[in-house]
Amino acid sequence: MQWFREAKFGLFIHWGLYAIPAGEWKGKPVPGIGEWIMNRAKIPVGEYEQLATQFNPVKFNAEEWVKMAKDAGMKYVVITSKHHDGFAMYQSAVSKYNVVDATPFKRDVVKELALACAKHGLKFGVYYSQAQDWHEKNGAGNSWDFGPDPQKDFDQYLRDKALPQLKELMSNYGPMCLVWFDTPRMMTKERSQPFIDAIHQMQPACLIDGRLGASGDYRSMGDNVIPGTVVKEDWEVPATLNHTWGFKKDDNDWKTTPDLTFKLVDIVSKGGNYLLNVGPTAEGVIPQPSQDNLRGVGKWLKVNGES
Ligand code: JFZ
C-alpha cells in the first residue's frame, strides 16, 4: 500500500471504440455516458464490432499523455484495457477482438503506455471489466443480443475470456500497480477468488480495487463522491472532468481548475487518492480543456511546493 498512500493523485483513461461514435449513433445523440453507447442504443454486436475497422488514432502518443500526467503532479496512470464493450486495447491471444488484431492501427496501446510510464517514473495499472462484456454471449450485460444474464453460462465466460485475459495483462506489461475491476454483476466471492489468486501469484505487489466482487485492497468510492470526513481504510475517488468517461463530443461542461484543485486538497486531507479521468478522442488526442485543467492543477501543486 505504501506507493498508493504516497501517490494521492492519478490519471484515469477511458479509451476504446466508443470514442468513434463519441455519443452519437446514426446521426442521433445517445443519452448517457459515452462508453455506454453500445448498451444505451442497443447496438447489435455485429454492428458495433465494425467500429474496430475504423479505429486508427494516428495522433496517439503515449509519452505525451504520460508527460501531461507528470505535469499535473500525478503519480499513477490507469487505462481501460477492456471496458464493458469487450474490446481489448492490447494484443490478446484469447480474443481477436483487440486493438492489434482487429484495427488498421495494429498497435498495442497498453504496451506503449506501460513503457512510457516506466520511462518517466509513473506507476501503471489497468481497468478491466471482469463481469460485463457485451461482446460475449455469456458475458454479463448484453441482453439485446443474448438475453437475460441469469440464463447465461457466466462461468464459461469467466473461465475462457476474463481470467485468461487478466493473466495476459499480468504477464506481458511489466509491473502493474493495480487492477481496477468494475461493476461486479454476478460476481460472487467464489467467482472473484481465481482473479485474486492469479494476481497474488503473478504480481504479489499489485493492488486490487474495491469493485471486483470480493473485498479489495482499498475502497473505491462512488464516482465523483467525496466523503465528508476522514476514512479509516485506504480509498480512492474516481472522477470525471466533465460528465462522461469515454469521449463524447457534445459534453463540454468542464469542471474548473480551482474546483478540481479544491477537490484534490479535500480528498488528500481526508486520506484518499483522486483518480481523475480523461477521455481521448478517436484520433488519440486528450481534449484540450482536460489538458489545460490537469496542467492547471499541476501548476498549483508546484507553486505550493507539493510536487
Ligand atoms: C462504472 C462504469 O460502468 C463506467 O462506464 C465507468 O467506467 C465508471 C468509472 O465505472 O460505473 C460506475 C460504477 C460504480 C459506481 C458508479 C458508476 N458507483 O459505485 O457509484
Image (cartoon, grey):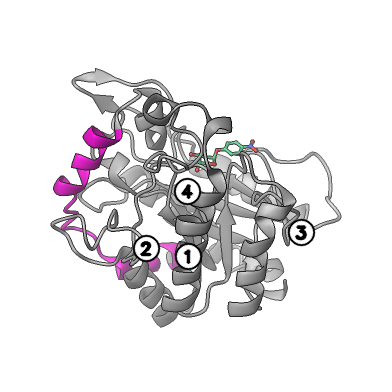
Q: Which residues are magenta?
A: 45-70
Distance Cα–Cα, label 4 vs label 3? 20 Å
Amino acid type of the residue that numbered disc 1 sits on in the rendered structure: Pro
Residue extending farthest to the right is 232
Which residue is the site of mark 1? 164
Q: Which residue is mark 2?
A: 94
For the residue marked with disc 3, what is the amino acid? Asp
Residue in view at x 23 percent, y 63 percent: 100
Q: Nearer the viewer, mark 1 or mark 4?
A: 1
Picture coordinates of residue 7, whole percent (x, y): 63, 67
Amino acid type indicated by mark 2: Val
Answer few, some or many: residues within 10 Å of disc 1's Cα (few below 14, many 20 plus, some between 14 and 19): some
Q: Is residue 161 above or below residue 289?
A: below
> x and y percent of residue 259 in the render?
57, 40
Q: CA distance from mark 4 to mark 2?
A: 28 Å
| Quadrant of res 303 | bottom right
Q: Main secondary structure of the magenta part?
A: helix
Residue at image position (28%, 44%) is 17
| Mark 4 or 3, nearer chain start | 3
Circle 2 SS class: loop
Q: Nearer the viewer, residue 180 or 13?
A: 180
Nearest to N terminus: mark 4 or mark 2: 2
Q: Amino acid at mark 4?
A: Asn
**Where is mark 4, residue-wise?**
277
- Residue 200: x, y in percent? 66, 74
> Quadrant of the image for the N terminus?
bottom right
Q: Nearer the viewer, mark 3 or mark 1?
A: 1
Residue at 82% of width from left, 57% of height from top? 233
Relative to 163, 232 lies left or right: right
Please tell me whether mark 1 sits on a helix, a strand or a loop. Answer: helix
Disc 3 target residue: 234
Could you say which is closer to the camera, residue 285 or residue 175?
175
